């Protein structure tokens, strides 16, 4: 696994340790090569005593059936091309293969995509949206955290056709979504007791959401003083009648999506898990409905779905390694 | 001051201690009568060494020019009737005199209003909305915290006439808004690492907001794991062109509302103060604008405005006692 | 399991769900009888859909091989007497059977012990101290959270004989240690940004620690603004030479105690687990050594050890159900 | 003021804005020169609209009666030499002039002191310890945060002569003590839900404490998941009899130290202020006493004392600008 020094990488290792069919061969992180993994993740002490290495992509593609990449956008493309060429499957948790259009990639991430032909091969890895394609893919682009919470909130509606008004997605995330980089904005003292919006109208996850739902959306991300969790409050211009039943039916066979009927989602109730919890509520106005969606940004929003995708790619039972309840409190 | 054992009462005392024209005669709290105030508010030790008393409203109305009430809804009406009858001014920080229609009060708070004739006398105490009426009032109904943040976000728009679509107010509050009562839902372990919506479509502040803005709204409150602050993200169906300039002009003479042009509001930037900070932003969709509003729910959302109202009622400079910057970090 | 509505009860259920040899027959909580368990523990939704019941101890003793009790002190004695009489094993996570002397129980908890003859039967359930007795016991008194962290820090030293000076145990706990009761002192707004000592020189865990270590100690508990975790910093009047090696040797066969050599313990590194991490450090003074001990108060300090004790009582491998790594971050 | 981009600098500006005799002429921060101050400190918006500048020490010494320095250790020495030479008074909030012995400075900070002759001129700026010297000094070395809390806890005892056993100082600090630098260890996700000790036996504040108290101490710092505050729990080998009264008498004329008799200190009760609160408690052992000391590390532990020192240096009433109560909650 590559990019093992960040929060997503560490969470993925935690899931993989509980997966009975997985053997972790190596952990890579160029910037921290030579460090013990457990220096970065003391929770893994006694479970995985590996040392971080630099990446040799040719060698990796020979030693592994699948490689997970947790790399910054722009840096996955070259490694993916080598791994795929050599017949190694890839789940890329970064952003490089999420947008199917090379032009949209370029306008969103500010650089030309180096391997547009690989974009065509990549399956967008949201199982509830794309299960069959994922099963047959060698390259899966794991979704962004906000797009996961947002798309699952809207998917049942959009199967009925586009909405007249753009859905409004007011999304709130814990700080682990900003990664483990040493940035002043992520310091404890800047975040604690501080709730704020950011990247209003300009966040890179907006085009990904629009690609998933097939229509324009409004999307406002906010930073919450907590470590894990995303809660998206989604306003749609539809009456509420019958919607709850439709959501229940739509997700009735999904192992990781639960439509609540007697409570509201909360980030703590999904922390440390691969579950998405949804509620469908009247909005106090007859023409609108509110859909609330909660996930763990590091779980269902990243590492959990990566394991789910691996299970699909290898024909394993979908819930393997993903079945433990989270902590409360 | 009555209701001095709660968070709003304590914050009001803190402001009043810094007000050069105020003498605090007594602090009342039936449930805690006999306790030293500084047991409940250790920050006031050395500043206000009073003991909490039970209320004798007749006596109070003789000893004071003004009484502040920080009482649960339903319990201010009788005290207000006595105080006003005896010529004592009142700023009521509770909910009993905020809704001008007795019917709306009854349907919202579940009990008949006992003094509908006093409802008519009461001035709704949002200075930016109602300054002249407050100046001449003997009874001022201090606004709710969510209605303050929401109304200030919408006021400049509504002076232009009602919106075709109801504004969507996605509001987030720190836990002090739930008061100092011993409730499981307010325990540290329930709130920490837990972001969630509550009272979706049923919150009692919604009718108050609609009264202020003169049209239906959608309003969704959320609980943030932090002590102080409200941030409201408001979606309005208007193009952004010229709106920022309109907001700046509209609030140019208001001492406690600032329209930001080069940053976004955050709760920490207004913590411990009577300021409201606003931003007017394009929403990523040409037909909509996002207005973001931040206040301290205990400051501009309660105690700060109460002092502002007192200043107006007594003809004092409006900013007296309200001018200190907040803490950062 | 009885007392299932509190934090310890919920955490124990989470562990038991991951234990392959356990079937949870019923969950009891008199105060919440009739409620669904998942209303109190939303993390268990989909895993354990039981309704809380009132206790019928006679019936329970027939239906179960073992009953866990998570009850307030003073309320376990009668239930234990019934369960034990009927041949049902008990792990009592409360305080009623921890102190072996009835007199010490009475002076510490302010009431006479009703079943002193059961006190004699009870095994004190710290496996590292008392493994053999636990294996053969029908009644195990699960240790307190502070005594667990403190005793494990001192055990290797005390095997060498009493210390000339009393060890100083400066202990810090997250708020979940105060339970799920609705108390003002446990409210988010009281705890957040507030670090303080409490019960200085009077905490009920001090006699339990002294019983374990066989000599007087000084013990100062503090409250940390966090949900889970205890860190105890223990000062002992011994030179550091050779101590680290002694600790490593002493705990070399213990599956849940780790002596760190290249880092310091932290509460996050043991959160959600049954591990205790220790460090043995020079104190900056030649005559003293500092031992630092970290546990999860709900894990190794309560529910994890309860499962460990159950494993011992039934001859199961000790680590069954206790082997998952915790979360980071 | 120099070093205005960090937390101490911002807090000092907040205090100075409330000081009636101070005019802030310029704010300096080489790394952020050209930025608006209010970008870094949004709480100061509307109060101090200055732009950060690079330092010209010659010019500064002509334009100001006093310069505050909030610079990293090793970088104050040259500026101080210029400012003092030109007759400008200095309060140095950094570490460069706290240790009176050049050798101790070198062994502690790993570099030779460039101006040992200035060390002799510098007054150590703890008013309770050194009031008279501060009044006559041109250069005041503001104490470290831990040394402030620790020394105030021990000062009344040490006036009676050295203790036979070294006092044990178990100290806990909020994260703002680590500064505003972009470090992984200070990230929200690393600190939240994480209590830990650090720098055990090696912290640079230990020699400073020992210099103040005149004997060896043991000192263990810990990191608390909160923004502000230090609480030091100090164990001294003295019986408790009469000590409380001695502390009360010792500090009876100090405006910023309060000895509590009916409660325990907490960090929140001193947050945002220049107060130190102390308690003197029996330790559960007849030969020992526990002294607990709470300050705001940015207030009494840094910026508040800097203002106090300025007041002393200019013959102003000591409490000028330092009299507002803090927030609760």
Image: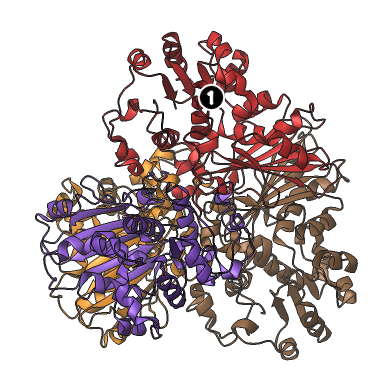
Chain colours: A brown, B red, C orange, D purple
- The vertical placement of A292 against A254, above or below, is above
- Please tell me which residue lies in front, D255 or B78: D255
Where in the figure is residue A107, as x and y percent of width and height? 85, 65
User: Which residue is at 38% across, 65% downward?
Assistant: C300
Image x and y of residue B326, in percent:
50, 47
Q: Find residue D203 and report its image quarter.
A: bottom left
User: In the displayed structure, would residue A138 be above or below residue B80?
Assistant: below
Q: How many marks?
A: 1
Residue at position x 65%, y 65% from top? A304
Q: Quadrant of the N terminus of chain B?
A: top left
Callout 1 environment at 10 Å: few (<14), some (14 to 19), or many (20+)?
Answer: many
Residue, disc 1: B312
On the question of residue C114 being in view, the answer is yes
Q: Is residue A15 left or right of residue D76?
A: right
Q: Is residue B277 left or right of residue B179?
A: right
Which element is circle 1 on? helix
Q: Position of residue C260 (x, y in %)?
A: 39, 80
């Amino acid at each position: 696994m590559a990019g093992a020094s960040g929060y997503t990488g560490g969470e993925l290792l935690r899931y993989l340790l509980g997966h009975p069919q997985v053997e972790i061969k190596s952990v890579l992180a160029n910037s921290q090569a030579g460090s013990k993994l457990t220096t970065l993740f003391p929770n893994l002490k006694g479970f995985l005593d590996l040392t971080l290495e630099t990446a040799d992509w040719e060698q990796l593609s020979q030693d592994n059936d699948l490689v997970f990449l947790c790399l910054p956008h722009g840096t996955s493309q070259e490694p993916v091309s080598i791994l795929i060429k050599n017949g190694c499957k890839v789940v890329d948790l970064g952003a490089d293969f999420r947008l199917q259009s090379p032009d949209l990639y370029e306008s969103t991430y500010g650089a030309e995509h180096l391997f547009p032909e690989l974009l065509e091969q990549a399956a967008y890895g949201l199982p509830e949206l794309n299960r069959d394609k994922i099963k047959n893919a060698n390259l899966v682009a794991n979704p962004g955290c906000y797009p996961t919470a947002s798309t699952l909130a809207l998917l049942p509606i959009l199967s009925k056709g586009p909405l007249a008004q753009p859905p409004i997605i007011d999304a709130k995330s814990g700080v682990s979504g900003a990664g483990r980089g040493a940035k002043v904005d992520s310091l404890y003292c800047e975040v604690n007791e501080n709730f704020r919006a950011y990247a209003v109208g300009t966040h890179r996850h907006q085009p990904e959401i629009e690609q998933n739902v097939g229509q324009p959306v409004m999307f406002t991300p906010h930073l919450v003083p907590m470590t894990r969790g995303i809660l998206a409050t989604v306003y749609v211009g539809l009456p509420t009648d019958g919607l709850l039943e439709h959501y229940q039916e739509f997700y009735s066979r999904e192992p990781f999506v639960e439509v609540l009927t007697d409570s509201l989602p909360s980030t703590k109730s999904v922390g440390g898990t691969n579950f998405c919890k949804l509620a469908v509520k009247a909005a106090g106005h007859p023409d609108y409905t509110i859909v609330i969606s909660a996930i763990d940004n590091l779980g269902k929003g990243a590492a959990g779905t990566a394991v789910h995708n691996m299970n699909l790619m290898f024909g394993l039972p979908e819930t393997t390694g993903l079945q433990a309840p989270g902590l409360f409190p």
